[in-house]
Image (cartoon, rainbow, N blue to C red):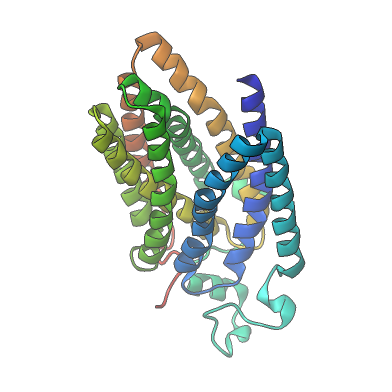
Amino acid sequence: MGTVSLLRNYGGIGTSTVWVPFTSTLMKWFTRRRGVAIGIALSGSGFGYLCAAPVLAYVIITYGWRMAFLIAGMSTFLIMFSSALVMKSSPQDIGLRPYGEELGTEQQSDVGQQETAGIAQDLTIREATRRTEFWLLYILWFFSTIMASIYNQHTVLFAITLGISSIIGSLALGTIGFSSILGRLTIGLLLDRIGIRRALIFCFLLNLTSAVLLMVTKNELLLYMFAVIFGFSLGGRITLEVPLASGFFGLRNLGAVLGILETAFGIGGFIGPYLAGYMFDLAGRYYEVFLFCVLLSISLSILTTRFKLNESAGSRGS
């Protein structure tokens, strides 16, 4: 178990080195329809999960786990290396304008362009970390990751306590990944119309619904209903992370700001599974764990109402 936990932590480090430059760069390529762009781009991770999981499972059964790790590592290296060769940090590097930027806007000031796009004025790292919004956002990501990691690591174990087979529990876990794709795409579209704060509150209300559903789950149907609702809300929340950060801190130092905020995911993801396991050991059941998730969802919804930023979410226009 210790080795597995260590591998997950190293995996998280590797994922963060991809996530931060990818998402911060993507924001520079769009002044309109940022929500749609982020939603479509991030849905790729869900599709990758659906494709890679069965392939690697087959490799493990046929050739062993060492070969599966080797194939996964080499494939990841080749894909990322090829992407790095063709990826450009901004459209200006190749003489283009961001999507949605009209002719003649080069005469606008940087601040004017950002206000038009719903993006905050650029802040330095020092300025960003001194703002209350930075730490509110850190707390939000930290606790939401605790909740997500609890579900990711304990859904199958919870299913087993109900007398549901581990295979059915694993399929429910896979359903979360599939539903997250729908959440990323849908919230990406809604983001252009209702703004970041309303979209984020909607996701946390779905989170609340899924946690309440788990408290009364007794069969496979309710377990799958939970998986669909939570997966949708998880995908939606992930889609909102970068637009939310850029709405507070601007684009120029967005990569560095995201790098600091990403530590909340690592810490929350480390604490969540162990915390849930400890609570289960004390109570002998998962009811209290899911009650904790209900309280977290309520708290996060309230916290979101305290955010004050441009509701256009950086995605004006159709």
Q: At x 46% / y 18%, what residue is drawn?
A: 277
- Looking at the rendering, in which quadrant would you find the N terminus? top right
Q: Nearer the viewer, residue 298 or 105?
A: 298
Image height of 35 relative to 103, above or below: above
Q: At x 50% / y 67%, what residue is drawn?
A: 37
Residue 208 left/right relative to 309: left
Q: At x 43% / y 35%, what residue is drawn?
A: 170
The residue furthest front is 62
Whether residue 314 is visible to the viewer of this picture, yes or no, is no
Q: Position of residue 269 (x, y in %)?
A: 54, 33
Image height of 128 relative to 250, above or below: above
Q: At x 41% / y 67%, what residue is drawn?
A: 312
Image height of 137 relative to 270, above or below: below
Q: Position of residue 108 (x, y in %)?
A: 59, 82
Q: Nearer the viewer, residue 300 or 268?
A: 268
Q: Nearer the viewer, residue 42 or 305?
A: 42
Q: Position of residue 295 (x, y in %)?
A: 32, 30
The residue furthest bottom is 104
